[in-house]
Amino acid sequence: MKVSAAPSSDYTLSPLSGDQYTSCLCANERKTLSWTMNPTALGVVNVTVSAEAVPSHASCENEIVEVPERGRIDTVTRSLRVEAEGSEIIKTQNWLLCPTGETLTEETEVQLPENVIDGSARVTVSVLGDILGRALKNLEGLLKMPYGCGEQNMALLAPNIYILHYLKNTQQLTPATKEKAFNFLSSGYQRQLNYKDYEGAYSTFGSGPGNTWLTSFVLRSFFQAQSFIYIDPVNIEKSRTWLNHQQKQNGCFKKSGKLFNNRMKGGVSDEVTLSAYITAAFLEMNISVNDRVVAQSLLCLKESINDFSNTYTTALLAYVFTLAGDMETRAHLLQHLDSVAIKDVGSSIHWSQRSAETSATLSVEISSYVLLAKLSASHTAEDLGYASGIVRWLTTQQNYYGGFSSTQDTVVALQALSFYSSLVFSPEGSSTVTVQSPSGPLTFDVTPDNKLLYQEKMLQGEAGKYSLEVKGTGCVSVQISHQFNIPTFTDATTLRVKVEPEADCSVTPQKPRLNIQLQSLYSGKENTTNMVIVDIKVLTGFAPVSEPLKKLRAAQLVDRVEHKDDHVVMYLRELQRGVAINHSLELQQEFPVQNLKPAVIKIYDYYQPSDQAETEYNYPCGAA
């Protein structure tokens, strides 16, 4: 047999002896041949190796060499992912540009830090004729986050519903899109039932007391999904009955389970925010304001309408009273919201929770609820103009996948954007987008026939000035995304993760082991965090050992552990301020790697991903 590797510009393969391997191979025998691989390009590279039976006059263990007439050559190609070391940074800039015959221009600059990892930078320009097109393309991955609990599963499922309603209302729903979304909805629905108890309540991990917030989120989503898939009406009825039983004598609802994002807390109690959310869910389900439960909750909510200390709650209440048809209360709330709106140059409008703390996640939610409140009642051309200012800001916050930074902001923003898009949709209009980049011009044509087509071009990661020019009569959504890696930044924020790798370097076993000791700590203002994610990237060539991985699943504060590809993801229920929590994970080397680069461990607040910290670790004994 002669075994040889195909040449490639993406890597070099060096055999351990000579340029190729030639060997006898007897019946029922197997041999392993090794090369040293040195990648020279990032991304997915294909490695191709061929084995060929060749004639030989030399005998093979006293046997005459045979060459089969058929199957003389076998070729195998495998893909390997080559990643840059350090931490990946993704920055996006978004524009929603609507020319009406005139030419619109925008300018921006892509800047790369001095310490960027060589070869890791890349710039992507993408154009769509629809602000929901980006989310539609990435229905299964709106967030680059783990999806291991009941609320995260719903964050995948709910946007599908809103986008489907939009496509249906605007007659853009194709059979292919309908089938794709139907499969997502069906599997998401079945998966969600794993988190339901016998009373119809849902909990984050399917155990413990039902969560009022999550149950109302599931209820409103299932009700709207009925247009597209079969939802057992018993499931909807049981959840509604369970929520009804959570109502207190004053009409508000008692909290069961955690309020998912503790940053919502402010001058009013969690009770009002929670009750407004549940009431909105009931009203979205077309339950009458004369229904006893809804009428009582509206009375309770009305008592807090003059407390404007929590902008999030004020925006949610504006949406609730809009749905309830109480125009006087709605006007009162919207008037206050307009007085505290942040109006930027270029006529974009948004809100934040409080001036002392900028939370992008809550700003997106608040702005989305105001947008829903503005549009859910009869509206004027002036209202639509105001709404377009909110939409202009919301689109600037979208990530590369068309979602936003966390789960609830993605769900509420896509609900609001799909509602707005349904109202202003026009099948007419074409535009041409020209992007001047440091490496030359790019041109994109958007027509009525390709509005939802995701057009993307990737450039070398060049820093420099980029300019956009849009001509025509149709709205376009343009995104410039640049990704790059930098050495891991280990300065602590309110969250911190420390790592101590331990290995016995005095012995050289065939498969060396590495024990990672982790310590997670929170030192912020709140008493406890929200749910915290610890994302451990596994060193190249290593894999988790199964028994210690099982123990980690039962460790202190750990609600769930996922092992996917080269990541182990831990879900921590919460961290208390100033209390360090220790965990350990054991890895085993599966194949040796020379010049092994450190792997990154990232800790972040699931609902406030900007609260994060990173550190890195390596195998302390060098190459094995």
Image (cartoon, rainbow, N blue to C red):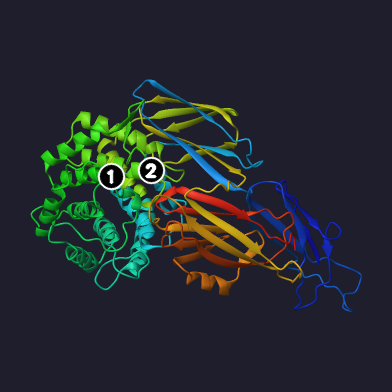
> Hey, which residue is sitting farthest right in the picture?
58
Q: Residue at x 54, y 60 (%)?
A: 519
Q: Is residue 327 above or below residue 620?
A: above
Look at the image and tell me whether residue 174 can be seen: no
Which disc, if any, is residue 312?
A: 1
Q: Are marks 2 and 1 in contact (CB under 8 Å)?
A: no
Which disc, if any, is residue 359?
A: 2
Name the foreground residue: 404 vs 76: 404
Query: Alpha carbon of mark 2 to alpha carbon of mark 1: how far?
Result: 11 Å
**Percent position (x, y) of residue 262?**
34, 53
Q: Is residue 620 above or below residue 207?
A: above
Instruction: Name the quarter where the C terminus is drawn.
Output: bottom right
Look at the image and tell me whether residue 252 can be seen: yes
Callout 1 crowding tier (Cα within 10 Å): few <14, some 14–19, many ≥20: many
Residue type, numbered disc 2: Ser
N-terminal of the pair, mark 2 or mark 1, is 1
Q: Is residue 442 above or below residue 450?
A: above
Q: Residue at x 33, y 63 (%)?
A: 189
Name the foreground residue: 326 vs 434: 326
Mark 2 lies on a secondary structure that is loop
> Hey, which residue is sitting farthest left in the picture?
290
**Percent position (x, y) of residue 375?**
22, 39
Residue type, numbered disc 1: Tyr
Name the foreground residue: 389 vs 78: 389
Name the foreground residue: 373 vs 180: 373
Dividing the picture into quarters, in which one does residue 61 lie? bottom right
Query: Would you say 472 lies left or right of 16 here?
Result: left
Callout 2 crowding tier (Cα within 10 Å): few <14, some 14–19, many ≥20: some
Mark 1 lies on a secondary structure that is helix
**Percent position (x, y) of residue 13?**
76, 54
Instruction: Name the quarter where the N terminus is drawn.
Output: bottom right
